[in-house]
Image (cartoon, helix red, strand yellow):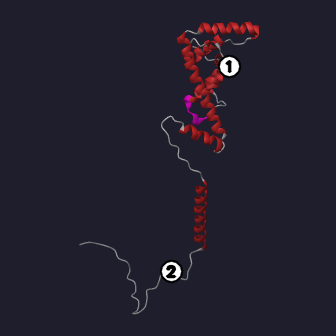
């Protein structure tokens, strides 16, 4: 035994007649529906033409053969312009990469015992520039070692303000690690520049 539901019985049409239709065939759809349908068709057609106008390219090659490099270069040359947020993010990452490279350079200088070469470079700069030599390569090396490698230097008031407050290189998309390294670059950019220009550490005998 089961249960179910039923719909009201429809009147049976007379013999030879036809059942009445819900909507007469002569009634057209409302104008709003016709307009929306036309707009959708136009949008689909425009999207189709736009897709046909795109140039598609397949880059094939082994690993590390330069596929990503070519793609990025084409985006830089022919892609959309970068927003201010994108440019700030790139600046943060570039500064972070410089700090990473400087850390490695400092570690190599220490492991190879090239501090004396830095002292010689410093004396040569003093002989050339006299009392107006400014920061010497050895002073730049000692400052960067203390702040970037050994972490033994106490932060100055300006450095604490830079670390605690907002700053020009801030970009949430770059990540906190990159932000921290970029802040270190802004704090010690002069000593990084001086150490990067040292000549004696590039001696062919090394």
Helix, strand or loop: magenta stretch: helix
Q: Percent position (x, y) of residue 202?
A: 61, 15
80 to 136, vertically: above or below: below
Q: Secondary structure at mark 1?
A: helix
Choose between 34 and 110: the one closer to the eye: 110
> Would you say residue 37 is visible in this rendering?
yes
Q: Secondary structure at mark 2?
A: loop
Image quadrant where residue 134 sits: top right
Q: Would you call the spot at circle 2 few (<14 residues within 10 Å), some (14-19), or many (20 or more)?
A: few
Q: Percent position (x, y) of residue 149?
A: 55, 17
> Would you say residue 151 is visible in this rendering?
no
Choose between 196 and 199: the one closer to the eye: 199
Instruction: Tell which residue pokes out farthest to the left in this image.
Output: 1
Q: Would you call the spot at circle 1 few (<14 residues within 10 Å), some (14-19), or many (20 or more)?
A: few
Q: Percent position (x, y) of residue 206?
A: 56, 12
**Residue under the point 60% across and 25% down:** 98
Q: Percent position (x, y) of residue 28?
A: 57, 78
Verify CB contact (< 8 Å) between mark 1 and mark 2: no
* Residue 176 belongs to magenta span: yes
How far apart marks 1 and 2 lie (CA) works out to 83 Å
**Residue under the point 31% across and 73% down:** 4
Report the number of numbered marks.
Answer: 2
Find disc 2 in the rendering and name its residue: 23
**Residue under the point 65% across and 36% down:** 87
Indicate which disc, 1 or 2, sits on the residue closer to the N terminus.
2
Quadrant, the N terminus: bottom left
* Residue 73 belongs to magenta span: no
Magenta residues, as a range? 170-177
Q: Is residue 27 left or right of residue 6?
A: right
Find disc 1 in the rendering and name its residue: 190
54 to 111, vertically: above or below: below
């Amino acid at each position: 035994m089961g249960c179910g539901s039923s719909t009201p019985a429809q009147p049976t049409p007379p013999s030879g007649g036809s059942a009445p239709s819900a909507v007469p065939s002569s009634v057209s759809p409302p104008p709003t529906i016709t307009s929306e349908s036309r707009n959708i068709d136009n949008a689909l057609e425009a999207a189709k033409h736009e897709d046909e106008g795109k140039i598609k390219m397949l880059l094939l090659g082994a690993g590390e053969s330069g596929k990503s490099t070519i793609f990025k270069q084409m985006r830089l040359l022919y892609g959309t312009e970068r927003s201010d947020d994108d440019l700030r993010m790139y600046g943060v990452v570039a500064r972070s990469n410089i700090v990473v490279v400087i850390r490695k350079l400092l570690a190599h200088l220490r492991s190879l015992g090239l501090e004396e070469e830095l002292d010689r470079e410093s004396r040569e700069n003093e002989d050339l520039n006299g009392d107006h030599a400014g920061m010497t390569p050895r002073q730049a090396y000692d400052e960067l070692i203390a702040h970037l490698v050994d972490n033994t230097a106490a932060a100055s008031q300006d450095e604490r303000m830079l670390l605690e407050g907002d700053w020009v290189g801030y970009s949430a998309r770059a990540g906190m690690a990159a932000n921290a390294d970029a802040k270190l670059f802004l704090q010690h950019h002069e000593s990084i520049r001086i150490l990067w220009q040292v000549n004696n550490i590039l001696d062919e005998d090394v």
